[in-house]
Image (cartoon, helix red, strand yellow):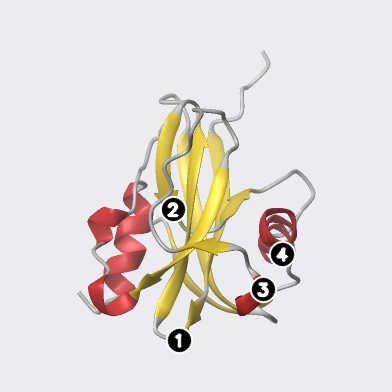
Amino acid sequence: MIQQEKFIIRVYGIAIHNGCILVCDEIWHDTYMTKFPGGGLEFGEGTIDCLKRECMEEFGQNVEVLSHIYTTDFFQPTLFLKDKQLISIYYTMALPSPELIVTLDTRTQFSQKENGSMAFRWMALDSMNPDDLTLPVDRIVAEKLLGR
């Protein structure tokens, strides 16, 4: 009997610069999301290498991964594949040139709902609300960052 993979592992980075946190507005599976930068772990890859690869792909910087913040410690079905369990791993990271990341000042309204569309922005920590983020585990991490 062939056993199907039951876990999806995602790795995310938390970057803070000048009192703001980097977030990504993205369309995936025809769903508009605001989330932390990062993505899916590939077979044969370590979690830190995954985060570095994702950041290079998404905004072209070789980040320094600093410390582990959180790993999902409860059952969380994936947003799009309800028969799979999501494990999300979060790290703080330093950006070599945060000012060079192309960002927008407001939440992006994409003109076309094209999967894979993404834009980055800096969200002020002092006005951040965990509900501004789409993914349930991102909200938990935001609450931890805000000391709630």
Element on which disc 3 rests = helix
Q: Which residue is mark 1?
A: 18
* Occupied quadrant, residue 75: top left
- Mark 4 or mark 3, which has the lower sequence index? 4
Q: Which residue is mark 2?
A: 35
Cα separation, mark 1 vs mark 2, equals 19 Å
Q: Which class describes the residues within 10 Å of circle 3: few (<14), some (14-19), or many (20+)? A: few
Kindly check if marks 4 and 1 are in contact, taking CB atoms under 8 A apart as contact. Answer: no
Q: Nearer the viewer, mark 1 or mark 2?
A: 1
Question: 8 or 117, which lies in front?
Answer: 117
Kindly check if marks 2 and 3 are in contact, taking CB atoms under 8 A apart as contact. Answer: no
- Decide if residue 78 is in sight here: no
Q: Quadrant of the N terminus?
A: top right
Element on which disc 2 rests = strand
In the image, taking residue 137 as reference, residue 55 lies left or right, namely: right
Cα separation, mark 4 vs mark 3, equals 17 Å
Q: Which residue is mark 3?
A: 100
- Mark 4 or mark 2, which has the lower sequence index? 2
Q: Whole-percent x and y of residue 88?
A: 49, 53
Q: Whole-percent x and y of residue 104?
A: 49, 60
